[in-house]
Image (tube, rainbow, N blue to C red):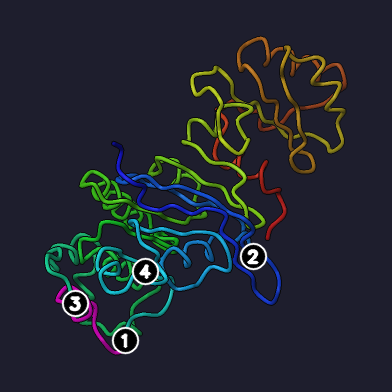
């Protein structure tokens, strides 16, 4: 018999001032996996995760975390779950090491504090009061506080926001190590490269619902932007991008390209041709441009990315 999911959300509804911020959302997180939750600002992802963490009570639907209702889970459940917060939760005058030692003392088998401090680059600031730490240092301390108790399940809210490249890499390595140790990780992020590298499953949320879910390979397979991500990850599809004057006849370009190609002007003057990327596609696109005195600038060929999928599903306007 397969183990129960680490997190199970069924038809979750949460309202603020009568408006449904989360509108019948469902998702499942398997034990020992890393799940990345993506979505534009206001999509409902933070409210969903805060409900799973036990900070908000659902208006309708079911939420189970490690088999328990997080709203009524109590001390036993909290001891098994680590939560990284974007702000708050740390006394302004306490130092990094003091806070970590205090939190570690609350758990039966915590991680070794000195090693965690060194790993996350907090050693030189170990005696500095929290309020005097930089934003990146505060972020790293919040991550350390979430994992020091050796939780079975960790929720990470934008774990690398504001971090430099070295700190981002250290954070990624820590997440990968936790997964190797059987820890389940749920993270929200705006960094598509982070989701692509770390996640076993990506869940895209918009307008309070899941609009796509699957592995990064499934979601980036051409034509796989549906709610289940069922594309063929081995399909030889990709995209050809270029810039030109706005308003080109994309229907005409699609007709000139190989069969099953799809053309879009995803922002004014920026075009993408999706299909079987090869010499024939490149030749057809450049020939079409030449016949219309169009100079395709910045022409590039590449695989479809999570950012492409995200923009297709949630739109290109900033929210």
Crowding at dot 3, Cα within 10 Å, few <14 / some 14-19 / many 20+, comes out as many
Q: Is residue 239 left or right of residue 32?
A: right
Mark-to-mark CA distance, 3 and 1? 12 Å
In the image, 214: left or right of 165? right
In the image, which disc is placed on residue 139? 4
Label 1 or label 2, whichever comes before in sequence order: 2
- 4 vs 2, front mark: 2
Q: Is residue 252 magenta?
A: no
Q: In the depicted view, which residue is nearer to us: 171 or 23?
A: 23
Specify the label residue 151 is tagged with.
none
Identify the mark nearer the N-term, 4 or 1. 1
Q: How many marks?
A: 4
**Circle nearer the viewer, 3 or 1:** 1
Q: Residues within 10 Å of mark 1 (few under 14, many from 20)?
A: few
| Nearer the camera: disc 1 or disc 2 | 2
Looking at the image, tell me whether mark 3 or mark 2 is earlier in sequence order.
Answer: 2
Q: Assign the N terminus to one quadrant of the image.
A: top left
Residue named by callout 3: 97
Q: Percent x, y for residue 319?
A: 68, 60
Depicted 315 relative to depicted 241: above or below? below
SS label for mark 4: helix
Which residue matches tag 2? 21
Vertical arrangement, residue 189 with respect to residue 258, above or below: below
User: Sequence-wise, which precedes: disc 4 or disc 2?
Assistant: 2
The location of residue 200, given as percent across then percent down, is 39, 40
């Amino acid at each position: 018999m397969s183990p129960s999911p680490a997190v199970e959300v069924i038809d979750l509804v949460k309202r603020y001032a009568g408006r449904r911020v989360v509108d019948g959302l469902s998702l499942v997180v398997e034990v020992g996996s890393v799940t990345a939750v993506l979505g534009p600002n206001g999509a409902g992802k933070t409210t969903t995760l805060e409900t799973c963490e036990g900070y908000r009570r659902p208006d309708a639907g079911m939420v189970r975390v490690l088999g328990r209702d997080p709203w009524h889970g109590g001390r036993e459940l909290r001891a098994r779950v680590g939560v990284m917060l974007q702000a708050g939760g740390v006394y302004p005058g306490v130092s990094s090491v003091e806070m970590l030692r205090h939190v570690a003392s609350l758990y039966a088998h915590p991680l070794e504090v000195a090693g965690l401090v060194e790993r996350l680059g907090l050693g030189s600031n170990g005696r500095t009061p929290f309020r005097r730490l930089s934003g990146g240092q505060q972020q790293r301390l919040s991550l350390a506080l979430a994992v020091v108790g050796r939780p079975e399940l960790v929720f990470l809210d934008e774990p690398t926001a504001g971090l430099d490249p070295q700190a981002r890499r250290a954070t990624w390595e820590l997440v990968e190590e936790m997964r190797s140790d059987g820890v389940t990780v749920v993270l929200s992020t705006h960094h598509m490269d982070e989701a692509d590298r770390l996640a076993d499953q990506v869940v895209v949320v918009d307008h309070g619902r899941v609009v796509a879910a699957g592995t990064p390979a499934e979601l980036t397979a051409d034509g796989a932007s549906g709610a289940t991500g069922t594309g063929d990850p081995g399909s030889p599809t990709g995209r050809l991008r270029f810039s030109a004057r706005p308003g080109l006849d994309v229907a005409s370009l699609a007709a000139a390209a190989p069969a099953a190609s799809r053309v879009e002007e995803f922002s004014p003057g920026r075009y993408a041709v999706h299909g079987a990327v090869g010499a024939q596609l490149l030749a057809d696109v450049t020939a079409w441009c030449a016949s219309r005195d169009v100079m395709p600038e910045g022409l590039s060929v590449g695989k479809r990315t999570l950012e492409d999928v995200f923009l297709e599903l949630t739109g290109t306007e900033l929210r």
